[in-house]
Image (cartoon, grey):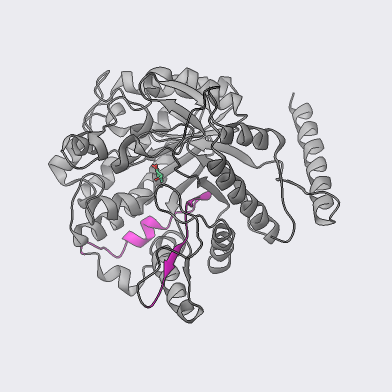
């Protein structure tokens, strides 16, 4: 079996190299991704699972936040969401039909440990057993995120959540329990998804749960989340039942100036924003400015944060624009998604290259999220011709291909999202899925973008225009 498998891999690698050579020589316009390249999609627990109070699940900060009038558009909640808790087998079958190599999902901490410390909830734990087993039976790699924003409310009420250092130990204990249970089958683990959002949207602007508006708390939470990453990484490695691929997922963007005279500002903004995470994670350092905002800081903290990582996940949706006048929006002639985010695929290639240049020590990269919200219409024939989303994905994947050609070690791409789902403060009003969900009936329908993505994942190729 093993020899056959190796031979197949060799054969595939040979074909892929030949195809890439043909592309480089101008003999073909098809770009072949490396044979190990992982194609996936992602979701997160609160956005898709529903079953918010079933089988012993505890309350999360998002359950509480959604109940407060005015926090979420149309008063929507994740109580039912896509009902994936009950429909996971159907959803994983969709992943198979989409030819996905991997499915990225998160564990709802309050589902498996209702109070965030102490007793585990076996019914919640067994849900993820079933999900993982289903994926493996279909030949799809499970990629687990330990924290995608749904903190147990009890930790918020009793300790102040991530603002309190004790939460770091609770996160490490939770991580240890999850890795102990699932790492016999799951190799890919992510400690945190987009800690910038949990820190600053959750504690500075109050746009996300827990809805706090205090910049000092936000900075402390940002630091404590990095401590969670460090402590979680150590706990995961100690509990692992196989060699893990362990990393963190950051929403990184490249800052660019519309006016060339402002280029130095863009440079500074990149160093400040990406550096806030990459310096401590990869180099065990904070800038003076970052450090100044953190009240509860201990010298040994940086050693804890600076753990070796097997990969870095990057979520990219749009570039960030800077200008000395403060005016950047709207960019003349630019396209925007329904979120109001500028569509600028070339900046993804520049971001990947910039990270490699500024941080040569960075581990292999994955684009762990990329996608677009657009309004979808179901045609009479039952199709969803989501051409804009398809083009968004295609143009960004092209840029990933070009970054690989530039020499950046990108190992995979995950389209966000498998399903239309609960888009946080925007509720169900923003659809990111490559599969359409009718929230009244829970019917799923693969969109045209999904059909295109399935073919890309199957063939491991895209048609790449020349002179991009
Ligand atoms: O839906 C979110 C996801 O939960 C985190 N990254 C950005 C996505 C789109 O806003």
The residue sitting at 67% across, 41% down in the picture is: 36
Residue 424 found in image quarter: top left
Furthest-left residue in this view: 158
Quadrant where the image shows the C terminus: bottom right
* Residue 82, percent from left and from top: 38, 26
Q: Is residue 271 left or right of residue 158?
A: right
Total numbered labels placed on residues in the image: 0
The residue sitting at 26% across, 60% down in the picture is: 219
Q: Is residue 377 left or right of residue 30?
A: left
* Residue 127, percent from left and from top: 38, 21
Give the quarter the ligand 1 occupies: top left
Q: Nearer the viewer, residue 438 or 273?
A: 438
Q: Is residue 41 visible?
A: yes
The residue sitting at 36% across, 62% down in the picture is: 302
In magenta stretch: residue 318: yes
Q: Is residue 11 left or right of residue 299?
A: right
Quadrant where the image shows the N terminus: top right
* Residue 56, percent from left and from top: 24, 20
Q: Is residue 284 visible?
A: no
Q: Is residue 318 left or right of residue 16?
A: left
Furthest-bottom residue in this view: 261
* Residue 145, percent from left and from top: 42, 39
In magenta stretch: residue 51: no
Residue 393 found in image quarter: top right
Is 74 situated above or below 254?
above
Read off the magenta span: 295-324
The residue sitting at 43% across, 52% down in the picture is: 250
């Amino acid at each position: 079996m093993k020899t056959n498998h190796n031979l197949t891999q060799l054969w595939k690698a040979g074909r892929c190299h030949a195809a890439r050579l043909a592309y480089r020589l101008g003999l073909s316009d098809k770009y072949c991704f490396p044979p190990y390249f992982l194609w996936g999609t992602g979701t997160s627990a609160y956005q898709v699972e529903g079953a918010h109070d079933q089988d012993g699940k505890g309350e999360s900060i998002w359950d509480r936040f959604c109940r407060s009038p005015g926090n979420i558009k149309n008063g929507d909640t994740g109580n039912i969401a896509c009902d994936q808790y009950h429909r996971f087998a159907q959803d994983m079958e969709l992943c198979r039909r989409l030819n996905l190599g991997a499915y990225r999902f998160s564990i709802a901490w309050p589902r498996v440990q209702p109070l965030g410390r102490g007793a585990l909830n076996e019914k919640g734990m067994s849900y993820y057993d079933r999900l993982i087993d289903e994926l493996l039976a279909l030949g799809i790699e499970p990629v687990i995120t330990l924290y995608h924003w749904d903190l147990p409310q009890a930790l918020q009420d009793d300790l102040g959540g991530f603002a309190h250092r004790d939460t770091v130990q609770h996160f490490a204990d939770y991580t240890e329990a999850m890795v102990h249970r699932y790492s016999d089958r799951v190799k890919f683990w992510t400690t945190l998804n987009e800690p910038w959002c949990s820190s600053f949207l959750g504690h500075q602007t109050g746009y996300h749960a827990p809805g706090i508006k205090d910049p000092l708390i936000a900075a402390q939470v940002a630091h404590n989340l990095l401590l969670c990453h460090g402590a979680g990484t150590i706990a995961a490695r100690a509990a692992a039942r196989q060699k893990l691929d362990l990393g963190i997922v950051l929403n990184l963007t490249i800052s660019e100036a519309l006016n060339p005279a402002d280029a130095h500002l863009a440079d500074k903004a990149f160093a400040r924003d990406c550096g806030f995470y990459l310096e401590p994670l990869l180099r065990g350092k904070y800038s003076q400015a970052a450090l100044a905002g953190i009240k509860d800081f201990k010298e040994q903290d940086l050693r804890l944060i600076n753990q070796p990582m097997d990969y870095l996940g990057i979520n990219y949706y749009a570039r960030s624009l800077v200008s000395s006048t403060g005016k950047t929006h709207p960019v003349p002639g630019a396209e925007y998604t329904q979120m109001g985010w500028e569509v600028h695929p070339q900046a993804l290639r520049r971001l990947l290259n910039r990270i490699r240049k500024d941080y040569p020590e960075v581990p292999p990269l994955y684009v762990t999220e990329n996608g677009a919200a657009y309004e979808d219409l179901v045609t009479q024939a039952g199709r969803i011709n989501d051409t804009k989303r398809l083009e968004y994905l295609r143009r960004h994947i092209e840029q990933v291909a070009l970054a690989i050609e530039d020499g950046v070690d990108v190992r995979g791409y995950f389209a966000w999202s498998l399903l239309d789902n609960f888009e946080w403060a925007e509720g169900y009003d923003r659809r990111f899925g490559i599969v359409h969900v009718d929230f009244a009936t829970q019917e799923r329908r693969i969109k045209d973008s999904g059909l295109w993505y399935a073919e890309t994942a199957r063939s491991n190729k895209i048609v790449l225009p020349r002179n991009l």
